[in-house]
Image (cartoon, grey):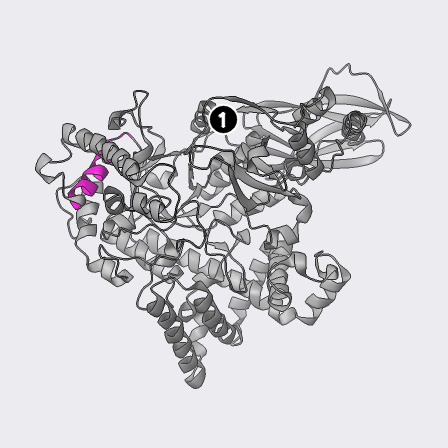
């Protein structure tokens, strides 16, 4: 591996490609030239020789001068921003802002003494205008009036601070976290669905006095089995997995009679039987049965007002939902990986694809209809939360990326970096680094598109919910790019315009009046947490990771105020399983331990002893109950309740005494990741109705509400 030369360094700096970093052992690591060259190639820059690097640098500057306006400019409300404008030398130009809300604001020209530049044989001049200041938040438009006509670009003014939604009324909030697919009911098809979510919200608000329920990402998976079980490796982050639809709650279902209704009942029973037999969440079997039922409901048709609503949804979602539906139909016809389709179908704007769409118009409409129905049922769940007085309601989850063969990589391939995956550098958990198999967005293309794909995704995620958790929020600042063929150990960080991405997130949160929580666990530079705090986005604190500078458990009074605080998370076992050290033995069985089993068990024992001492010293746990895992679990939640954290989180698996974990990092099929149904302390699957009648949730809710015992009602 070789050292980068000066022009390669300049290109890396231009595109925000890290040339070095500090690893998990505190060592300074220099990124080799081969890695930087590979990343630049994914950005369509030939950096194979010093001469080509020099030519690329000149070309980039020429391109900047060719553009009259930058593609997109983002600024915080109240701040001023200078924008450079390029026109033929000696010609006049003026600038104004067209506000999203209506109206126009002139821009002020300021001094710019940059010399003219000859581009493509023509001299061009540069003028600078100052924008911002008193502009309202929104997606505005810059208009440059030139001798050649009007030129437009996007000017986004974002709120400086998000904070808490008004519905919280300045009060602390707490809620449950759960993997929705694992929480099935007597009425669902073997996979927890949006009707189950509405019922879970009703119970959580009416009987537990919780303020929200945090669920796994609802992102769309493959439409054709086998489905990817991980909700964090989706086909699309903008659209919803229709597996979560409850067919019987679609208004048109009531019109089904006789054989058609009995057939749907048979399909439901058959789907449930598969999971009952295996003791697993059987997505493929459930979806194969459910889609047949959904087609029957779709064929009923819509009454006039419902048809108007559906058509409005199609117009609102535009090309995006049409292409996603088209990808779904193509997948059913040609297979899961679009990269293996006949070449004429690999481009969404090809003549063959247009002909295919025309031939399969009804089927494409069916898949658009599925998205509309899913959105309706999400909205119904949020309404259920509001009706029982929850201050937040549904909090959904936003994954860090999409699958390499996803709908999104087919719909907009030029937005993704070809030949790159997102991952992580080597650390104490993965000595060779990690390759997550997700292609990263290109920062330059996002800016060229005025962040349109990101804006659409965030707006869709926040539609009719009370908040969102952003998985790996550091990904809005930088991502570890892994060049295929070099491996994750020879990757590098690529920076994103966090001012733009966080700003757009803040703007959409302001419009939705939603809570934003960033998962900022792991190695995160202090300035990132400071920045998120300044912009009013919450961080994440998990008890088992909270230690002070002295290496001891961090006292509750020193926890962050602006964070979502919890005892555990979905990548760790439920608390009772953690206390039993089930995770250590599981990692041993799977060959994932780096130390002998006894040494790891002893380390875990010391860790837990330190926390038990902290609980006893703080008066949260009677010493005589230190061997009772349920009492320790309750005491740990009592501990986080005494922190200043404004948002608290309990896990539904803790409320029912579950021990099994949902996901074992570092495995795929060696452990049934994301396929474990909700169970009790014995591992027996339990239904949502069983949760409603259980005793332990009442005890945990009493702790979260700061009471000795949970009353029947919070009214009066």
Q: Main secondary structure of the magenta part?
A: helix
Residues shaded magenta: 630-644
* Residue wearing tag 1: 23
Residue 391 in view (yes/no): yes
Quarter that holds the N terminus: top right
Question: Going by the image, does 129 lie left or right of 375?
Answer: right
Callout 1 environment at 10 Å: few (<14), some (14 to 19), or many (20+)? few
- Determine whether 693 is above or below 586 in the image: below
Residue 600 within the magenta-colored segment of the rendering:
no
Question: Going by the image, does 483 lie left or right of 466?
Answer: right
Question: At 69% across and 32% down in the image, what residue appears?
Answer: 37
Question: Going by the image, does 355 lie left or right of 363?
Answer: right
Question: Going by the image, does 254 lie left or right of 139?
Answer: left
Give the quadrant of residue 514. Answer: top left
- Determine whether 383 is above or below 462 in the image: below
Residue 633 within the magenta-colored segment of the rendering:
yes
The x and y percentages for residue 444 are: 67, 35
- Compare residues 85 and 568 and report the one nearer the observer: 568
> Which residue is outermost to the right?
121
Question: At 67% across and 41% down in the image, what residue appears?
Answer: 449
């Amino acid at each position: 591996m070789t050292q980068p030369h000066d022009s390669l360094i300049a290109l890396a700096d231009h595109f925000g490609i890290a040339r070095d970093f500090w690893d998990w052992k505190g060592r300074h690591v220099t990124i080799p030239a081969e890695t930087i060259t590979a990343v630049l190639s994914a950005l369509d820059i030939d950096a194979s020789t010093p001469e080509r690097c020099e030519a690329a640098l000149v070309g980039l500057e020429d391109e900047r001068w060719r553009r009259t306006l930058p593609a997109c400019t983002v600024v915080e409300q109240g701040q001023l921003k200078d924008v450079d404008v390029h026109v033929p030398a000696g010609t006049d130009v003026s600038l104004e802002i067209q506000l999203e809300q209506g109206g126009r604001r002139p821009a002020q020209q300021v001094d710019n003494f940059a010399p003219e530049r000859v581009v493509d044989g023509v001299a061009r001049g540069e003028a600078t205008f100052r924008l911002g200041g008193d502009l309202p938040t929104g997606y505005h438009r810059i208009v440059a009036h030139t001798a050649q006509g009007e030129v437009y670009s996007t000017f986004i003014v974002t709120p400086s601070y998000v904070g808490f939604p008004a519905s919280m009324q300045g009060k602390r909030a707490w809620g449950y976290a759960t993997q929705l697919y694992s929480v099935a009911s007597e009425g669902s098809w073997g996979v927890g669905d949006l009707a189950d979510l509405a019922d879970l919200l009703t119970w959580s608000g009416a009987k537990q006095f919780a303020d929200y329920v945090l669920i796994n990402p609802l992102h769309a998976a493959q439409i054709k089995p086998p489905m990817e079980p991980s909700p964090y490796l989706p086909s699309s982050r903008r659209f919803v997995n229709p597996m979560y639809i409850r067919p019987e709650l679609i208004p048109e279902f009531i019109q089904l009679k006789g054989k058609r209704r009995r057939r749907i009942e048979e399909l439901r029973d058959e789907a449930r039987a598969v999971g009952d037999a295996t003791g697993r969440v059987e997505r493929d079997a459930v979806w194969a049965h459910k889609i047949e039922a959904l087609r029957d409901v779709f064929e009923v048709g819509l009454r006039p007002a419902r048809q108007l609503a559906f058509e409005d949804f199609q117009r609102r979602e535009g090309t995006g939902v049409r292409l996603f539906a088209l990808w779904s139909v193509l997948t059913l016809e040609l297979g899961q990986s679009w990269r293996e389709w006949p070449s004429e179908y690999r481009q969404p704007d090809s003549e063959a694809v247009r002909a295919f769409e025309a031939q399969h118009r009804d089927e494409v409409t069916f898949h658009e209809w599925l998205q509309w129905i899913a959105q309706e049922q999400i909205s119904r769940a949020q309404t259920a939360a509001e009706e029982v007085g929850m201050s937040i309601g549904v909090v959904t989850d936003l994954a860090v990326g999409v699958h390499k063969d996803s709908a999104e990589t087919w719909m907009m391939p030029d937005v993704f970096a070809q030949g790159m995956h997102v991952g992580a550098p080597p650390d104490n958990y993965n000595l060779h680094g990690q390759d997550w198999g997700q292609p990263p967005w290109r920062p330059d293309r996002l800016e060229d598109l005025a962040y349109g794909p990101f804006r659409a995704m965030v707006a869709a995620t926040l539609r009719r919910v009370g908040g969102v958790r952003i998985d790996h929020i550091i990904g809005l600042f930088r991502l570890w790019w892994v060049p295929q063929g070099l491996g994750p150990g020879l990757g590098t960080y690529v920076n994103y315009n966090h001012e733009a991405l966080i700003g757009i997130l803040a703007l959409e949160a302001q419009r939705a009046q939603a809570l934003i929580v960033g998962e900022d666990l792991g190695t995160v530079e202090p300035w990132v947490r400071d920045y998120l705090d300044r912009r009013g986005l919450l961080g994440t604190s998990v008890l088992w990771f909270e230690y002070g500078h002295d290496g001891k458990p961090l006292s509750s009074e020193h926890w962050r105020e602006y964070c979502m605080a919890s005892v555990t998370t979905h990548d760790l076992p439920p608390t009772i399983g953690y206390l039993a050290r089930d995770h250590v033995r599981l990692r041993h069985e799977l060959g994932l331990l780096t130390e002998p089993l006894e040494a790891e068990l002893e380390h875990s024992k010391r860790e837990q002893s330190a926390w038990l001492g902290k609980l006893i010293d703080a008066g949260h746990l009677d010493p005589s109950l230190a061997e009772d895992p349920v009492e320790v679990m309750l005491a740990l939640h009592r501990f986080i309740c005494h922190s200043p954290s404004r948002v608290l989180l309990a896990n539904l698996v803790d409320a029912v005494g579950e021990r099994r974990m949902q996901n074992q990092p570092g495995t795929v099929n060696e452990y049934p990741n994301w396929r474990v149904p909700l169970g009790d302390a014995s591992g027996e699957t339990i239904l949502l109705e069983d949760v409603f009648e259980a005793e332990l949730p009442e005890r945990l809710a009493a702790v979260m509400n700061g009471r000795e015992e949970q009353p029947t009602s919070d009214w009066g």
